[in-house]
């Protein structure tokens, strides 16, 4: 569920597993990744809505470092960061991030 970008369902499953086995290391690691990437994405989105594009860009960049293997989330983050670059008039960087989003998720074409 986590790598399918279904964070709500992943959180439900993680809670269930940790209720049964609170020391399950892989689940704890997944929970940490999910919490971090979701928090960063939400923070970036809030900053973008406030038209704080440079700050949102920095948060999206931090979020991209959380889990390099999460293809779907990272495609969205690259797309979001591209929107920031575009709002800041940095069109080359926006194109680069759009290209990265497409490479990760062909549905962005």
Image (cartoon, helix red, strand yellow):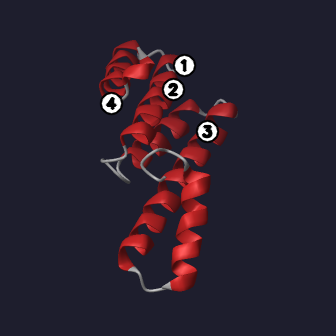
Residue on which disc 2 sits: 84
Task: Compare residues 68 and 16 and report the one nearer the observer.
Answer: 16
Residue drawn at x 47%, y 41% is 60
Q: Is residue 13 left or right of residue 49?
A: left
Residue drawn at x 46%, y 30% is 81
The local secondary structure at tag 2 comes to helix
Sequence order check, earlier mark of 4 and 3: 3
Separation of residues labelled 2 and 3 (CA atoms): 10 Å
Dot 2 and dot 1 residues touching (CB under 8 Å): yes
Sequence order check, earlier mark of 1 and 4: 1
Q: Nearer the viewer, mark 2 or mark 4?
A: 4
Sequence order check, earlier mark of 2 and 4: 2
Residue on which disc 3 sits: 45
Separation of residues labelled 2 and 1 (CA atoms): 5 Å
Residue drawn at x 40%, y 42% is 61
Residue on which disc 1 sits: 87
Residue 28 vertical position relative to residue 23 in the rendered view, above or below = above
Q: Nearer the viewer, mark 1 or mark 4?
A: 4
Residue 83 location in percent, x, y? 51, 23
Residue 107 location in percent, x, y? 43, 21
Q: Which mark is residue 104?
A: 4
Residue 48 location in percent, x, y? 62, 33
Residue drawn at x 58%, y 62% is 11
């Amino acid at each position: 569920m986590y790598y399918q970008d279904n964070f709500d369902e992943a959180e439900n499953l993680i809670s269930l597993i940790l209720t049964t086995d609170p020391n399950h290391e892989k689940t704890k690691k997944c929970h940490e990744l999910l919490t971090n990437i979701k928090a960063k994405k939400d923070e970036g989105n809030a900053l973008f809505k406030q038209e704080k594009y440079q700050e949102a860009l920095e948060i999206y960049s931090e979020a991209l470092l959380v889990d390099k293997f999460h293809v779907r989330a990272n495609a969205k983050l690259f797309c979001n960061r591209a929107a920031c670059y575009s709002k800041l008039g940095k069109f080359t960087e926006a194109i680069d991030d759009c290209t990265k989003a497409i490479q990760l998720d062909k549905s962005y074409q």
